[in-house]
Each structure stands twice: as structure tokens, then as C-alpha cells.
Amino acid sequence: MANRWVGVTVDCVDVERVAAFWSALLDRPRGPSRPGWVYLGRREDPLPRLVFQPVTESKRGKVRLHLDVAVDDIERGIAQVAALGGRSTGERHEYEQGVVVVMADPEDHEFCLVQYY
């Protein structure tokens, strides 16, 4: 049996807003979607799809899984996230291999911007 990773699903109160943020940040087009849901990409794409699923309750607490987004310039990446409606959490880690900044999307889903040296 061949298994392959095909997507990551994000629970959202405002599916359109959160999907638009991630679509712009990752330059990932919208694919065929179910009513009320938004899929970025297609099932047959080489990259896994991002799926935005409607829920009625807001996120509570820290998520246990997050995305890492590689950027060429960490400061420009932070500015882009802010311009798209996200924010920095203020958490930043400097490593020999690069820098990691913890960010949040418009509904406070945490993710990391990573600039490798």
C-alpha cells in the first residue's frame, strides 16, 4: 500500500479570510472546493493542499502542529505577514543555521517564518 501526504486542514471561523491570507502568503491558488470550504491547490499537485474547514468556535490555546514557511529575508517576511493581516507573536529564535520567528495568521493559528543561512 502506498501512502502519501495530500493536505493539511485548518479549522477557521472565517474560512474566506484565512484562506486568502495563506493564498497570498504562499502564492498558492484556490482549487476546486466544497461549499463553505476553501482548498488551496489540487489533490494531484506535487505539494499537499491546504484545506480551510469552517467551524463555529474560535481557536483556543496553542496548536500542536504548525507550518514552517521559508523566506529569503526574515524582516521582509514579517512585514508581508503583517500586511496580509497576520502578526508576530514576539517569539524569535536565533540558531547557527538560521532564524525562526513565530507568527500568527488572522485567526491566531501559529506558524514559523524561517530564514536559513
Image (spheres, rainbow, N blue to C red):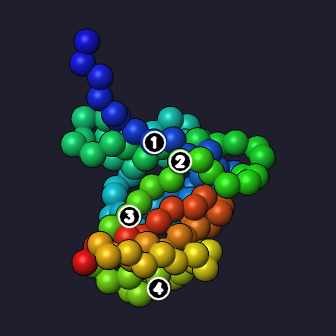
Q: Earlier in the sequence, mark 1 or mark 2?
A: 1
- Residue 80 or 54: which is nearer the viewer? 80
Q: Quadrant of the N terminus?
A: top left
| Amino acid type assigned to the residue bearing label 3 in the image | Val
Identified at 59% across, 47% down, the residue is: 64
Residue at 41 percent across and 60 percent down: it is 68
Q: CA distance from mark 1 to mark 3?
A: 14 Å
Residue type indicated by callout 2 = Leu
Residue most toward the top? Answer: 1
Labels 4 and 1: the sequence-earlier one? 1
Element carrying mark 4: helix
**First-in-chain label (4 vs 3):** 3
The CA span between labels 4 and 3 is 14 Å
Residue neighbourhood size for the residue with mark 4, other residues' Cα within 10 Å, grouped as few (<14), some (14–19), many (≥20): few
Using the image, determine if residue 25 lies above or below residue 40. Answer: below
Chain-order first, disc 4 or disc 2: 2
Badge 4 vs badge 2, beta-carbon distance below 8 Å: no
Relative image position of residue 47 (x, y in whole percent): 27, 46
Q: Which mark is residue 8?
A: 1
Q: Measuring from the top left, give residue 13's x and y in whole percent.
A: 69, 51
Residue 46: which quarter of the image? top left
Front-lying residue, 77 or 63: 63
- Which labelled disc corresponds to residue 65? 2
